[in-house]
Amino acid sequence: MRELTPQVLGIVVRRFRDFDMAEDAVQDASMAAVMQWPRDGVPENPRAWLTQVAFRRMADHIRSESARRRREMDVAEEAARAPESALDTVGEEDDTLILLFLCCHPALTPASAITLTLRAIGGLTTAEIASAFLVPETTMAQRISRAKQTIKESGIPFQLPNAEEREARLRSVLHILYLIFNEGYTASSGPRLLRADLSQEGIRLARMALRLQPENTEVAGLLALMLLTDARRHARIGLHDELIPLAQQNRTLWDQGQIAEGIALLSAALPKGPVGPYQLQAGIAAVHDEAAGAEDTEWPQILALYELLKRMSDNPMVILNHAIAAAMVHGPKEGLKLLDALKGDPRMIEHHRLDAVRAHLLEMAGDLQAAARCYHAAAGKTVNLPERNYLLMQAARLTTGMVDS
């Protein structure tokens, strides 16, 4: 059902040009399937069955509209009377990619695009999305409603954009999938470090995007990055959901199947054309994953990859991670000097990671007092409880060490 629903929604939106009403109709059809299929058996062509029921629901909706919509009612009634064999041909087309481009349209804010993508393509309920982002269900419902209204008012056609638009809009699509995965891999707030359901949903949607655009090397790079990163998930938390940093993880818990798949995807993508930022990030993740232990990590290779990545992006997280790699190769003073580039950057003023990285490098340099202060400052800026606890523990460890000495 999760695989078929976005396909059917794409067909209905294409036919009727009304995202909001189409989603309601597809939900009704899905509910009918949940009720009937266990009793009567799954139909021979489930997508055609769902499409036909959704068309009928649309016809019911349109019949209740005023006379000025008579033309749309005629179309709806014709579609509702269509034999199942006619719907089979409609079902041959997969409109999921168009729907993905629609949900991730630049007219929407990233927050709206994430929620709409999870709702329309991911199949998550409003309550599930609200729970993931720790907001009331009514707030999330309003956010989704506003996103649909934005699409409706923008007049965005339900069709694949042309080559130039597709290139620009694909960046938005991949960025949204990347944000969905990251929110699952490290929740932005709340009592849990991970939201595995969201990171798995990001992987599922990236797989879908790759099936729809198998020759796109950046889509392959994004999926590889997700797999290579998610492979470490089980080693990243302890028995009480406490954060375990990369250097201290039990690498026997890493998912070797995911690592092998990610490396294979990356190896196949790299020779095909220009290397993009997701492929570079996947390459960095692969170097980490292939190291037998933290001490075996090829930091010079990681540093070289980050230097390439910096040329492509002014993302402050790239600068931050580049500083860590430089510290591991050239010493903490070099890393601390590179962090100065982020002083006053408005994107990082309230972000805990800048203070956390500075604390780590100061500790490497032997300035334990300054490191403890930075760990405390970082803890005060994060609202993810396991991250905060970890940072406070690091500050306490250094403070205790100074007292003992």
Image (cartoon, rainbow, N blue to C red):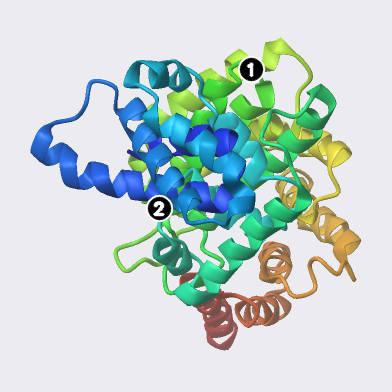
- What residue is rendered at 52% in x and 59% in y? 186
Single out the residue that lies furthest toward the bottom.
403
Question: In the picture shown, does residue 315 fall above or below 134?
Answer: above
Amino acid bearing label 1: Ala
Return the mark for residue 269.
1
Crowd band around label 1 with a 10 angstrom C-alpha radius: few (<14), some (14–19), many (20+)? many
Mark 1: secondary structure: helix
Left or right of 250? Residue 364 is right
Left/right placement of residue 239 relative to residue 212 reads left
- Give how far apart the Cα atoms at labels 2 and 1 are: 26 Å
Residue 109 coordinates in the image, percent (x, y): 72, 58
> Where residue 311 sits: x, y (%)?
88, 37
> Would you name the residue on which mark 2 appears?
196
Residue 276: image location, x then y, percent: 75, 29
The relative height of residue 312 versus residue 272 in the rendered view (above or below) is below
Query: Which SS class for mark 2?
Result: helix
Which residue is nearer to you in this view: 240 or 89? Answer: 89
Specify the quadrant of the image occupied by residue 358: bottom right
Kindly identify the amino acid type of the residue bearing the numbered disc 2: Ala
Q: Is residue 99 above or below residue 334?
A: above
Local crowd size for mark 2, using a 10 Å CA cut-off: few (<14), some (14–19), many (≥20): some
Residue pictured at 79% horizontal, 37% vertical: 309
Looking at this view, is 134 or 107 the one in front? 107
Is 3 on the left-hand or right-hand side of 96? left
- Dot 2 or dot 1: first in sequence order is 2
Q: Can you see residue 3?
A: no
Total residue callouts = 2
